């Protein structure tokens, strides 16, 4: 039997991932009900299943994904980005290997760069202001926040970092940015044209939104549920853009290449010495 893999396609990045892995592509429209015959012929016999990044995109097709989950078997490998802990535990309990690509150092570093570029695209599309000379506030100073700060600064933006740990603030200041504790968030919100959150915890609440101008743009890059009090934002009429998975919208071929390289590095030992042709089944949403 020919070896094959399943690729759940939720965006252009995932489509290009299938192409870059160099395998034959079979398009399967998941908008229609998944048949039992399909599950037996493809999912149950697959060696690998490629979930989208972030994996929570599958919430859009919850019912059909549950069917796919029940067809997984011991010995298979599931790849994905930002895999929820609950799903990871579920897979491990059933003897199914799990690889969160966003936990790989090289992937995380490269993904931070393309996410920063994509975020700037969002800013330019949604904000009525230019970048040069305008104030930007970024919460956190992890990989993505740092890459974004560097790019905004290079374009003439005035960047302030909100961070709890003093050593992180020192690093940001050393690299040329203003940096303050979250206690000063309401003060920093006044006059900011764009607020970008990268912290996966509630850090932007009522006091912060109350100080924002009506035309302030808030972009939440953090994993679900994000870091913004949406009720407070609505109360003060501040738009919040939930922007997870931006590399799946912008920089799609580059982002796919990043994931493909990581998958190859993980599977090369399994493929050495095997002559069977590998297949990828693209499941189109």
Image (cartoon, helix red, strand yellow):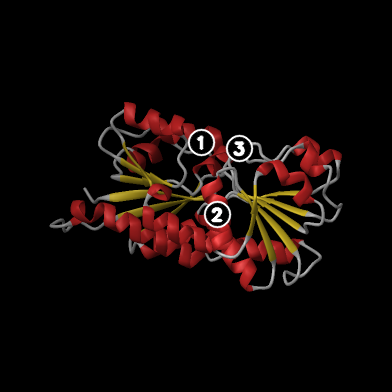
Residue 26 visible, this orientation: no
**Compared to 10, does 59 lie above or below?**
above
**Left of 41 or right of it: where is 120?**
right
**Left of 68 or right of it: where is 235?**
right
Foreground mark, 3 or 2, reads 2
Where is residue 133, by image quadrant? bottom right
Residue 67 visible, this orientation: yes
Q: Within 10 angstroms of label 1, few (less than 14), some, or many (20 or more) residues? A: some
**Compared to 59, does 264 lie above or below?**
below
**Foreground of the two, 54 or 64:** 54
**Compared to 99, does 280 lie above or below?**
below
Seen from this angle, which residue lies furthest top? 93
- Please report whichever mark, 3 or 1, sits nearer to the chain's N-terminal start: 1
Q: Within 10 angstroms of label 3, few (less than 14), some, or many (20 or more) residues? A: some
**Left of 139 or right of it: where is 273?**
left
Secondary structure beneath disc 3?
loop
Identify residue for label 1. Answer: 64
**Foreground of the two, 32 or 124:** 124
**Foreground of the two, 17 or 102:** 102
Distance between the alpha carbons at the discs numbered 3 and 1: 30 Å
Circles 2 and 1, Cβ within 8 Å, touching? The answer is no
Identify residue for label 2. Answer: 170
- Please report whichever mark, 3 or 2, sits nearer to the chain's N-terminal start: 2
- Please report whichever mark, 2 or 1, sits nearer to the chain's N-terminal start: 1
Q: What label sits on residue 201 in the rendered view?
A: 3
**Foreground of the two, 190 or 74:** 190
Foreground mark, 2 or 1, reads 2
Where in the figure is residue 14, as x and y percent of width and height?
47, 56
Which residue occupies 51% across, 36% down? Answer: 64
Where in the figure is residue 232, as x and y percent of width and height?
80, 37
Secondary structure beneath disc 1?
helix
């Amino acid at each position: 039997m020919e070896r094959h893999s399943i690729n759940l396609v939720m965006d252009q990045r995932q489509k290009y991932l299938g192409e870059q892995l160099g395998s034959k592509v079979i398009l399967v429209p998941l908008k229609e009900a998944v048949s039992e015959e399909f599950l037996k012929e493809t999912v149950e016999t697959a060696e690998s299943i490629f979930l989208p990044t972030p994996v929570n995109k599958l919430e859009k097709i919850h019912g059909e994904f549950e069917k796919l989950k029940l067809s997984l078997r011991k010995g298979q490998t599931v790849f994905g980005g930002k895999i929820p802990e609950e799903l990871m535990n579920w897979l491990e309990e059933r003897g199914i290997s799990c690889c969160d690509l966003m936990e790989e150092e090289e992937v995380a570093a490269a993904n931070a760069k393309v996410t920063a570029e994509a975020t700037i695209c969002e800013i330019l599309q949604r904000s009525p202001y230019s970048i040069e000379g305008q104030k930007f506030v970024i919460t956190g100073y992890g990989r993505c926040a740092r890459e974004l700060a560097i790019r905004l600064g290079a374009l003439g933006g005035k960047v302030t970092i909100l961070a709890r740990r003093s050593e992180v603030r020192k690093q940001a200041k050393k690299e040329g940015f203003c940096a303050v504790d979250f206690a000063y968030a309401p003060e920093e919100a006044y006059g900011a044209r764009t607020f970008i959150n990268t912290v996966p915890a509630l850090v932007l609440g009522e006091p912060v939104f109350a100080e924002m101008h009506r035309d302030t743009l808030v972009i939440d890059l953090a994993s679900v549920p994000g870091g913004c009090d949406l009720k407070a934002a609505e109360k003060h009429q501040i738009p919040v853009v939930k922007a997870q998975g931006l590399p799946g919208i912008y920089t799609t071929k580059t982002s796919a290449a990043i994931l493909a390289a990581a998958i190859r590095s993980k599977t090369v030992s399994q493929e050495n010495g095997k002559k069977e042709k590998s297949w990828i089944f693209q499941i189109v949403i």
